[in-house]
Amino acid sequence: DTEVTQTPKHLVMGMTNKKSLKCEQHMGHRAMYWYKQKAKKPPELMFVYSYEKLSINESVPSRFSPECPNSSLLNLHLHALQPEDSALYLCASSQDAPDRANAKNIQYFGAGTRLSVL
Amino acid sequence: EDKVVQSPLSLVVHEGDTVTLNCSYEVTNFRSLLWYKQEKKAPTFLFMLTSSGIEKKSGRLSSILDKKELSSILNITATQTGDSAIYLCAVERPTGNQFYFGTGTSLTVIP
């Protein structure tokens, strides 16, 4: 099973709303990721959690707030977003092997949440 | 700055044709290079390549890394309409858990 589940599939929110995106995996992966993908562009890394600790924040604005409650779950809390934040938000997970050169650290992706900010 | 560039940006072929997609990277001491296929939503994993240079194959798809040229190719033989998608390559940085995606190649296979 290589499934990463994201909810909701679609989300429309106003600029003053607060909402959350959720991601779940049961592959025993210890690294989880948030990406943002605009139309016809590649995914852009936002955050990485390794063993439930935030290890990488790619200078993402504070209106995006990640949370990793346990090793299977990853949330992305959204507040005061701008229309330009409208995009497909992808979650991914991988085994996490930062110290093992030959480890197969393959990322598996969820189907994404299509976010529209009005 | 780390860079991953794919070419061509888009490609239109007829069913049965063979295509070669390219990915070049400027990532110091990368750990691995991965190929993904993205149709409507989630990128799905195709291959993982490392500096061992071993070719990977799965059905009509194959891929190999050229460590000297800092590049990888993805070959698809006897293309089918179901191969129409965006093909992404991603390079993992040496510290691990940091993947950078290329620009993608949009492949359209016409019946």
Image: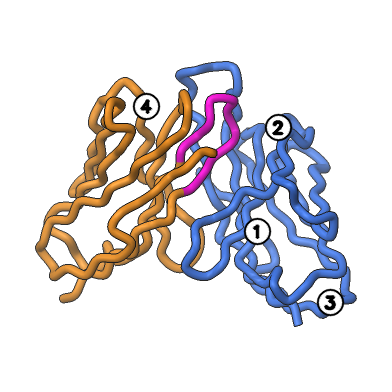
Residues indicated by labels 4 and 2 sit on the same polypeptide chain: no
Q: Chain of mark 1?
A: A
User: Where is mark 3, residue-wise?
Assistant: A15
Select label 3 or label 2 by which is in front: 3
Kind of residue at disc 1: Gln
Q: What numbered label is drawn on residue A50? A: 2
| Residue A10 higher or lower than B22, as above or below | below
Q: Earlier in the sequence, mark 3 or mark 2?
A: 3
User: Where is mark 1, residue-wise?
Assistant: A6
* Camera-side residue of B58 and A37: A37
Residues in magenta, as a range:
B91-101
| Residue A115 higher or lower than B22, as above or below | below
Residues indicated by labels 2 and 1 sit on the same polypeptide chain: yes
User: Where is mark 4, residue-wise?
Assistant: B50
Mark 4, Cα crowd under 10 Å, few <14 / some 14-19 / many 20+, is many
Q: Earlier in the sequence, mark 2 or mark 1?
A: 1
- Label 2 – label 1 distance at C-alpha: 19 Å
Query: Horizontally, is A1 left or right of A88 in the view?
Result: left
Circle 1 SS class? strand
Circle 4 SS class? loop
Mark 3, Cα crowd under 10 Å, few <14 / some 14-19 / many 20+, is few
Select label 1 or label 4 by which is in front: 4
- Label 4 – label 2 distance at C-alpha: 22 Å
Question: What residue sits 43% from the left and 44% below the top?
Answer: B4
Residue B93 in magenta stretch: yes
